[in-house]
């Protein structure tokens, strides 16, 4: 049973920086990589070395951030976005995944455009090969 409202799109690496939780006045992580996107939100993978030291020491367990608003910048687009953490997962010993939802903060048209503009898996490599062959 698929409960998703929007189809997910696997992405070429797109980077976010300065992931902040304003409600707790902390920087969650210095950087992360968007793994997939939909018109509802993003899935961000964060290496443990990029997490805030308090989180690494488990002073702030990741699951307590669920429901908290976050702010971050999509580096390649120079775009600051606001969202809400909906799920956290300690996916592997060296990284964690954080799912964010921006459906409450952004109009549907904007969300759909953002998901469409982000490069799908393999698109950036294809584009760079095309550019090199057209030189």
Image (cartoon, grey):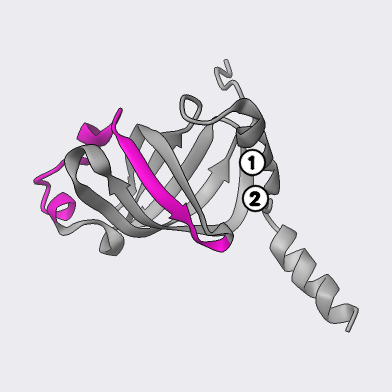
| Badge 2 vs badge 1, beta-carbon distance below 8 Å | yes
Lateral position of residue 122 relative to residue 45, left or right: right
Lateral position of residue 77 relative to residue 17, left or right: right
Q: Residues within 10 Å of mark 2 (few under 14, many from 20)?
A: many
Q: Which residues are magenta?
A: 54-76
Task: Work out whether 57 lies above or below 126.
Answer: above
The C terminus - image quarter:
bottom right
Q: Is residue 72 magenta?
A: yes
Residue 7 pos. (x, y %): 65, 30
Q: Is residue 68 magenta?
A: yes
- In front here: 9 or 74? 74
Task: Work out whether 125 lies above or below 29.
Answer: below
Residue 92 pos. (x, y %): 34, 51
Q: For the point 16% across and 58% down, which residue is it? A: 53
Most extreme residue toward the bottom is: 135
- In front here: 79 or 93? 79
Could you tell me which secondary element the residue under label 2 belongs to? loop
Q: For the point 46% across and 44% down, which residue is it? A: 81
Per the model, the C-alpha gap separating discs 2 and 1 is: 6 Å
Which dot marks residue 115? 1
Residue at the spot of label 2: 118
């Amino acid at each position: 049973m698929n409960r998703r409202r929007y189809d997910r799109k696997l992405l070429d690496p797109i980077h976010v920086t300065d992931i902040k939780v304003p409600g707790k006045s902390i920087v969650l992580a210095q950087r992360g990589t968007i793994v997939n996107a939909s018109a509802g939100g993003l899935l961000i993978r964060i290496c443990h070395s990029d997490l805030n030291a308090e989180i690494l020491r488990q002073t702030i367990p990741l699951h307590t951030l669920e429901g908290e608003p976050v702010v971050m910048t999509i580096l390649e687009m120079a775009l600051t976005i606001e969202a809400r953490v909906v799920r956290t997962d300690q996916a592997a010993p060296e990284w964690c995944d954080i799912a964010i939802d921006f459906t409450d903060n952004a109009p549907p048209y904007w969300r759909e455009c953002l998901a469409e503009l982000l490069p799908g898996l393999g698109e950036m490599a294809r584009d760079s090969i095309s550019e090199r062959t057209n030189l």
